[in-house]
Image (cartoon, helix red, strand yellow):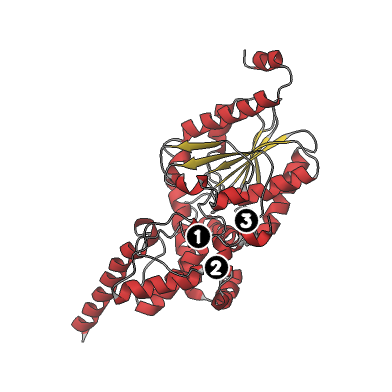
Amino acid sequence: MAESDLTGASRQFMLLPEFVAPRTAVEQTIAEIWQRRLGLDQVGMNDRFDDLGGTSLTAAIIFAEIEKTFAIRIPMATLIDAPTVGLLAPKVQRLTQLKESSHARSD
Amino acid sequence: MLVPINRTGSKPPLFFIHGANGIMPVGGLFSRILGSDYPFYVINAKGFDGSPPHRTFEEMVQAYYEYIVQTAPSGPVVVAAMCWGTLIGIDVARKLLSDGRELGPLILFDPPRNPFGGHASMQDASWGGGQAAISDDTSDPEVARQLYNYARGVMMTHASVPYNEMPFDARDPKQLDTATRTGIACTTALSRYANPTPFFGAVELIINVNVAQFFFGRQMPWQKLLPNPHPTHVYPYGHMEWFRAHRFNTGRLLKFILEGALAREATDVQQYEKSFA
């Protein structure tokens, strides 16, 4: 077996659940970050981070980018309770809303 | 960091390699379950004592291989490894086999579902800056902060479990900081490892029920990494439980595997039966 055969552990071989496309802008943005950082063609709402080959290092990179993109603070440990885009997006959305309402109160 | 748990015994010495965060926390318990006739060594990541940690996967493999050959210069040995450390275990075993050492078997405790995950990330050209940032944890402070907070939380969680054997005192802020940085170095090196290649030696896998489906299809990554038939034990609980609530069962399973391996290798059945009399 050539070494290159081993390196393409692509999504189609990973028994991932049926692809459900992200719908909201937050879901789409998070899915796009995961896709790019994990080197995948697509990431569905119900795909688990671990199943996609995510590591602690990629999690740190992804969460640093999510924080920067949405201007929030969210620790990578959030993945333990929210290991999919579908579960993570509402948390990001909530933090974004909290931040906006906090800004509005201080204005 | 080699941690001798039991230096004596007539059975092949067992070397148990740490997981993603650099710690194998239940070596003493497993050693007690195996009994005094099994020499038992834990290999934790280098750095918990303040020495510079290994920075690459290859450094870890070479160091752990040297620990083993210095401790057991001849005769059969058993290598076990947990979580992401299973990838280290495979390459250590490969080096031992290439020396002509008798190895049996390589026991892999709950490996990651996708051992090629790190490689997928490395293929992403836009990630080049991130890679540089991780190498010294300073170029990208936000990534470094995420890693630090996460690793510190993991260390504190492990340390809060009363029966865990930790290579540091989490009550000492300096030691906790050193342990956190060691954990980061370890998980970073493992995450960046990009070149798993097939291993054809004797292997026994222990996997949790949640990932079992990822191990049995012909196209599954682990079937490509371990192409030969290998016994696989599926335990009916989640990843953390094998070394927490169900640690005693896991220890007994380890003993079952080792006794089975010895039985298969025994040329004299009576001698084997006598050893358990």
Q: Is residue B37 left or right of residue B27?
A: right
Amino acid under disc 2: Ser
Q: Which residue is mark 3?
A: B47
Q: Nearer the viewer, residue A47 or A75?
A: A47
Q: CA distance from mark 1 to mark 3?
A: 27 Å
Instruction: Give the residue at mark 2.
Output: B121
Q: Is residue B103 in sight in this rendering?
A: yes
What chain does badge 1 belong to? A
The residue under the point 52% across, 58% down is B180
Can you tell which mark lies on residue B245?
Answer: none
Query: Going 73% across and 53% down the picture, which residue do you hit?
Result: B62
**Residue B35 percent coordinates (x, y):** 60, 25
Identified by mark 1, the residue type is Gly
The label on residue A53 is 1
Task: Check if mark 2 and mark 1 are on a common chain.
Answer: no
Q: Position of residue B93 (x, y in %)?
A: 70, 45
Note whether B273 is above or below B2 in the view shown: above
Q: How many marks?
A: 3
Task: Determine the CA span between mark 2 and mark 1.
Answer: 9 Å
Report if the CB atoms under discs 1 and 3 are less than 8 Å apart. no
Sequence-wise, which precedes: disc 2 or disc 3?
3
